[in-house]
Image (tube, rainbow, N blue to C red):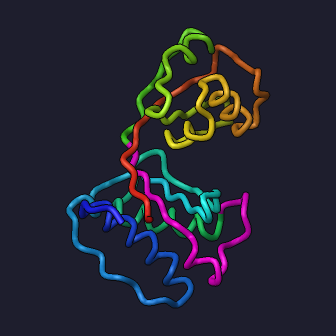
């Protein structure tokens, strides 16, 4: 567990939200000022280092404590890539909470410009084209360390071909503070 009070509170809130669905007693969440302020978060669930669910908010639109709890429930029970989390899996599931900075427009001349200016390991990226939109947290750089791979996979996630580029693609980038259970 992290040593700072915000990280402990966020991880406990996320785990409590899921555990309550299984009828498990909630742990006490220490009061932290930031929990009541608007915040955008992603909750990532893993088992044995493998993704088990990840859902989040790109923009702050509700209190951070609510955002984390709702995203934890969505990651556990409504991520379309996975079956709902079972009670028998809960103990071996690790929780990670990412607190996002507000997205900032990232205007680029073309894909080559984007590739040259991205900061691997630092930038989370939102790609939008028409009604299509997808994001990768900065943690995704761990499995896609090359900028070309990162953007190609992000385009695929948005339902676009990996080699697609159009002048109307817009990018925004953001950073995160993250906390992860041991």
Tally of marks: 0
Q: Is residue 81 magenta?
A: yes
Determine the image quadrant of residue 77.
bottom right
153 sits to left or right of 70: right
Percent x, y of residue 86: 66, 79
Q: Which of 182 and 32 is in front in this view?
A: 182
> What residue is shown at x 24% (from left), y 74% (from top)?
30
> What residue is shown at x 32% (from left), y 66% (from top)?
8
Q: Which of 45 and 107 is in front in this view?
A: 45
Percent x, y of residue 140: 57, 41
Which quadrant: the N terminus? bottom left
> What residue is shown at x 61% (from left), y 11% (from top)?
112
79 sits to left or right of 74: right
Instruction: Write down the region rendered in magenta.
Output: 79-100
**Image: 138 above or below 71:** above
> What residue is shown at x 43% (from left), y 52% (from top)?
98
Percent x, y of residue 27: 36, 82
9 sits to left or right of 176: left
Percent x, y of residue 94: 52, 67
Q: Which residue lies furthest to the right in this view?
A: 161
Which quadrant: the C terminus? bottom left
Q: Does the magenta stretch include residue 40?
A: no
**Image: 153 above or below 181:** above
**Image: 179 above or below 27:** above
């Amino acid at each position: 567990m992290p040593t700072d009070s915000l990280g402990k509170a966020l991880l406990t809130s996320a785990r409590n939200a899921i555990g309550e669905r299984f009828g498990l007693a909630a742990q006490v969440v220490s009061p932290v000022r930031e929990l009541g302020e608007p915040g955008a978060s992603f909750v990532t669930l893993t088992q044995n280092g493998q993704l088990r669910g990840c859902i989040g908010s790109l923009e702050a639109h509700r209190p951070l404590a609510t955002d984390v709890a709702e995203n934890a429930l969505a990651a556990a029970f409504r991520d379309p890539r996975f079956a709902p989390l079972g009670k028998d899996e809960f103990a071996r599931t690790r929780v990670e909470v990412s607190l996002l900075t507000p997205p900032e427009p990232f205007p680029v001349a073309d894909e080559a410009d984007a590739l040259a200016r991205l900061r691997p390991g630092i930038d989370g990226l939102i790609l939008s084209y028409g009604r299509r939109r997808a994001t990768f947290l900065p943690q995704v750089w761990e499995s896609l360390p090359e900028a070309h791979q990162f953007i190609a996979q992000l385009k695929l996630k948005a339902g676009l071909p990996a080699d697609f580029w159009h002048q109307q693609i817009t990018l925004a980038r953001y950073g995160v503070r993250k906390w992860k259970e041991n």
